[in-house]
Amino acid sequence: MTRVNPELLEEIRKYGAFDISACFNCGNCTAVCPLAKEDASFPRRLIRCGQVGLEDKIISAVEPWHCYYCGECSQTCPREASPGEYMMALRRYLIARYDITGISKIFYKNSYLQISLAAGLFAALVVLFNRYTGDFGALAAKIEMAFPVYVTLALGGYVLNMYRHIIVKPLGKIALTFKPKHIYETFYHGFTQANFTGCEETDWWRWISHLLVMSGYTLTLLISNLHLLEPLNERYTPFGPVSLLVWYAGLSIIIGGGSMSLRRVFKRRESSKFSHPSDWLFVTMLFLIGLSTLATHFTNVAYGPENPLLAQLYRINIAIETVWIILIVPFTKWIHIFFRPLAIYFQHIKKEAEAGTAFSL
Ligand code: SF4
Ligand code: SF4
């Protein structure tokens, strides 16, 4: 039986600015949406589900993860109902619904609490790290080694819950697809974010900025989680393999993240008109990670591991990374990196299940 939640639209509204109640279902957004090729009712179907309170349909939808917020639907909506912003709010709402801890929900509704906690934790860690009298390089190694464990646990909870809502509940069974084409597409979209280029007028700079941030950040994650850098013990050459990785990672995050921030400040494009406080926290933290990583590495390369400034910068760098991993990564849009390709994979499962060819239990 389909459950109706009369409070649903009000609840989703808490996750972003839009006025979808003004929508009179004309279908213009579906006509202009570059991603509406396969599902002719996208994004209108989800707007209707929100209006009439069909919560289960919203929670089991993969479409919000296909949308990269090009804003074409919002620009042409005759009722100024902001369907693009509605999709963005839906993504936040879904993150909160898939989060088994309930912390995302609290943070999205009280972003200033998350910002205050992040600032407080950062200050406390800097003080603690400065008072630490042991081998800080060894402590940093232990902290960095704990990151992947924490992130994997957090991510695992999300993925299982997303799978439960999108596949298990609607289909009534566990279903999977092992077709190489579907697995390839999942990874291809994950790495290239190809849906960006589906828009009428591709916003290349936005696509490049996202790609820079994603590749730079993934590399930073590998550098830190594999503990490739030991700046207090080793002196790196400017063009050694590790340095090249660090320069690329740091500069990509700074250029991509800086460009994303400037777009949000100047709001010239539809896609950057509305920013949730969590978006600002996200880009600011990313920028700081890139900056502190670069500054630490540059100081090591230029002045060597004994330099007292390097000791300070490295402590700040590890403090920023720790705040990022504990308070930002599991509870904000970072999780999009995984949800977008997973949504493509889950859509393939659904289609195969309809065709009766999915592997199922
Ligand atoms: S274009 Fe606007 S009014 Fe028309 S269906 Fe889409 S959101 Fe509703
Ligand atoms: S923002 Fe772009 S991709 Fe998203 S629903 Fe609107 S038109 Fe489609």
Image (spheres, rainbow, N blue to C red):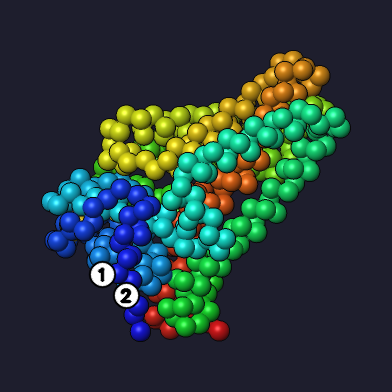
Q: Could you tell me the amino acid type at mark 2? A: Val
Q: Residue 321 at what x, y percent from top left?
A: 64, 38
Distance between the alpha carbons at the discs numbered 1 and 2: 7 Å
Q: Is residue 349 above or below residue 149?
A: below
Task: Check disc 1: other Cα within 10 Å, few if <14, some if 14-19, many if 20+.
Answer: some
Task: Check disc 2: other Cα within 10 Å, few if <14, some if 14-19, many if 20+.
Answer: some
Residue indicated by mark 1: 52
Which structural element holds mark 1? Answer: helix
Q: Is residue 194 above or below residue 9?
A: above
Q: Residue 140 at what x, y percent from top left?
A: 76, 37
Front-lying residue, 361 or 185? 361
How many marks the image carries: the answer is 2
Front-lying residue, 53 or 248? 53
Residue at 46% x, 68% y: name it.
Answer: 346
Q: Earlier in the sequence, mark 1 or mark 2?
A: 2
Residue at 59% x, 58% y: name it.
Answer: 155
Q: Residue 143 at what x, y percent from top left?
A: 74, 43
Which structural element holds mark 2? Answer: loop
Q: Is residue 43 visible?
A: yes
Tell whether circle 1 marks a residue whose Cβ is less than 8 angstroms from ligand 1: no
Q: Is residue 163 above or below residue 284?
A: below
Q: Are the two marked residues, 1 and 2, in contact with CB atoms closer than 8 angstroms?
A: yes
For the view shown, which residue lies furthest in the right direction?
134
Ligand 1: quadrant of the figure: bottom left
Q: Could you tell me the amino acid type at mark 1? A: Val
Residue indicated by mark 2: 4
Q: Residue 183 at what x, y percent from top left?
A: 52, 64
Q: Is residue 32 above or below residue 215?
A: below
Front-lying residue, 150 or 187? 150
